[in-house]
Amino acid sequence: MQSVSMIYFVLCRCFFISKHAPTFLCVLHYYQSGGRLYRPDDIPEDIFLTEIPFYQLGDQVSGQSPLQLVMIDASIFSLL
C-alpha cells in the first residue's frame, strides 16, 4: 500500500486523507455506478493512473489499459 498522509480530527470525528480529490470523485462514481471507472478529460492520465492503485479497486480495474478507461466531460462530476 502506498504511504499517505492521514489526519484524524477528533472534534468532527473525520479523517483527512491527502490524495488527489478529483480522482476520488471518479472512485466514488465507480462504486455508485456498479463498477464503471471513468477518467474525466481534465485529470491528466499520469496522475489518474498513479492515484487509482491506492483505492485497491481490484484486478478488473488494475488490469485495464489507459485506453480502456473511458474519458468523459468533467461537467458530469458537478452533479455529484
Image (cartoon, helix red, strand yellow):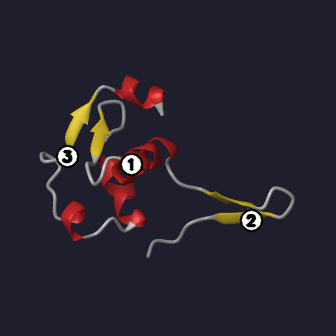
Q: Circle 3: is it few (<14), some (14-19), or many (20+) Cα within 10 Å?
A: some
3 or 1: mark nearer the eye: 1
Q: Find numbered disc 3 in the image and state the secondary structure of the residue it sits on.
A: loop
Residue under pointer 1: 32
Q: Amino acid at mark 3?
A: Leu
Reading the image, the residue beneath label 3 is 69
- Mark 2 vs mark 3: which is more N-terminal? 2
* Residue where numbered disc 2 is placed: 8
Residue 50 image-quadrant placement:
bottom left
Task: Examine the rendered structure and indicate whether residue 18 appears above or below residue 74.
Answer: below
Q: Earlier in the sequence, mark 3 or mark 1?
A: 1
Give coordinates of residue 33: x percent, y percent.
32, 47
Q: Give the spatial CA distance, label 3 vs label 1.
A: 17 Å
Q: Residue at x 30, y 25 (%)?
A: 73
Q: Nearer the viewer, residue 74 or 49?
A: 74
Say which mark, if any, is on residue 66: none
| Nearer-the-camera pick, 32 or 28 | 32
